[in-house]
Image (spheres, rainbow, N blue to C red):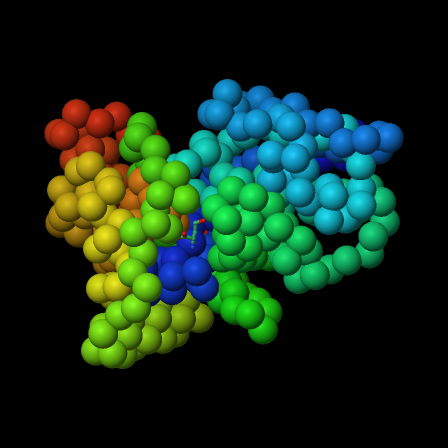
Amino acid sequence: MLTVRAPATSANLGSGFDVFGIALGTPADVVRVERAPKTTISVSGAGSEYIPEDPKKNTVGAVAEALDAPARIEIDKGVRPSSGLGSSAASAAAAAVALNELYDRGLTREELVPIAAEGEALVSGEAHSDNVAPSLLGGFTVATADGVTQVDTQIPVVACLPETTVSTRDARGVVPDSAPLGDVVATVGNAATLSVGMTRNDPELVGRGMADEIVTPKRTALIDGYERVREAALKAGATGVTVSGAGPGVLAVCYEADQRAVASAMLEAFNDVGIDSRAYQTRVG
Ligand code: HSE
């Protein structure tokens, strides 16, 4: 069987709602495919009990259909669903790469972005590319209607996942329809600062540029313990903290020397409010 690994991702980064994304060194999904007369899907690993195996309801089924590439598909989940780390996107990205190769479709990674995003539409109701783009291309990505811009960077991050879940659909439901001009201006400034920070590999600029007053405050209200975890991470040396994707994962950016302390502080803060969590100390990669 043909095997492809695709990384977890963190979307939005605060100021880049539905636009920014980063690929994480760990965790990852692994997808195995072989040609078959019709598509069948089996799922194992983290949270697999919550993932439908019916190809019509699974992100990977949508990818197989979009590529006209029926296959027996095995998904080994390393990225827990509804955690804020692009779980469905990792499976969709891995399947897109694997099926493109299996059927010699000859598409580039960039061309696979909208195809993998078809799977996202199935999960969230909208085909946004901010998770599939970094999962396919690596690094930091800026996904817009005109395409994707990618930058290689190695910013250290901590992604802390509580044992609670927030569905992407619910988290999209609290996003405001409009925002005051002042908040938009501030967010554009922060997004620009963050982008410069990524190109310079500068955790200080990236952390500062994650600030967002439009979407993030609405979503933090859905995450028990968020403020406590954020404050603990900042005190331990994080340069910025925000919601990872649609949550409930929390993403901190920091210097490598502070990574362990930041991870411990976040785990402890969730623990203080009675929530078990798991921290990934990794890099954008
Ligand atoms: N940009 C998306 C959101 C990522 O925040 O809703 C989650 O799929």
Which residue: 48% across, 25% down? 50
141 horizontally vs 68: left or right? left
Quadrant containing the N terminus is: top right
Q: Which residue is found at the position 23% from the left and 33% from the top?
A: 267
Who is closer to the viewer here, 109 or 127? Answer: 127
Q: Residue at x 17, y 38 (%)?
A: 225
- Nearer the observer, 23 or 110: 110
When asked about the image quadrant of residue 58, the answer is top right
Q: Reply above or below: 181 against 132.
A: below
Residue 90 seen in this snapshot: no
Question: In the rendering, at what x and y percent does residue 6 appear?
Answer: 59, 43
Tell me how many marks there are.
0
Q: Residue at x 30, y 30 (%)?
A: 164
162 in relation to 257, above or below: above
Q: Quadrant of residue 4?
A: top right
Image position of 152 with respect to 247: above or below: below
Q: Position of residue 194 (x, y in %)?
A: 35, 69
Q: Is residue 188 visible?
A: yes
Q: Position of residue 193 (x, y in %)?
A: 32, 73
Tell me: 201 left or right of 5: left
- Where is residue 127 shown, x and y percent of the image? 55, 55
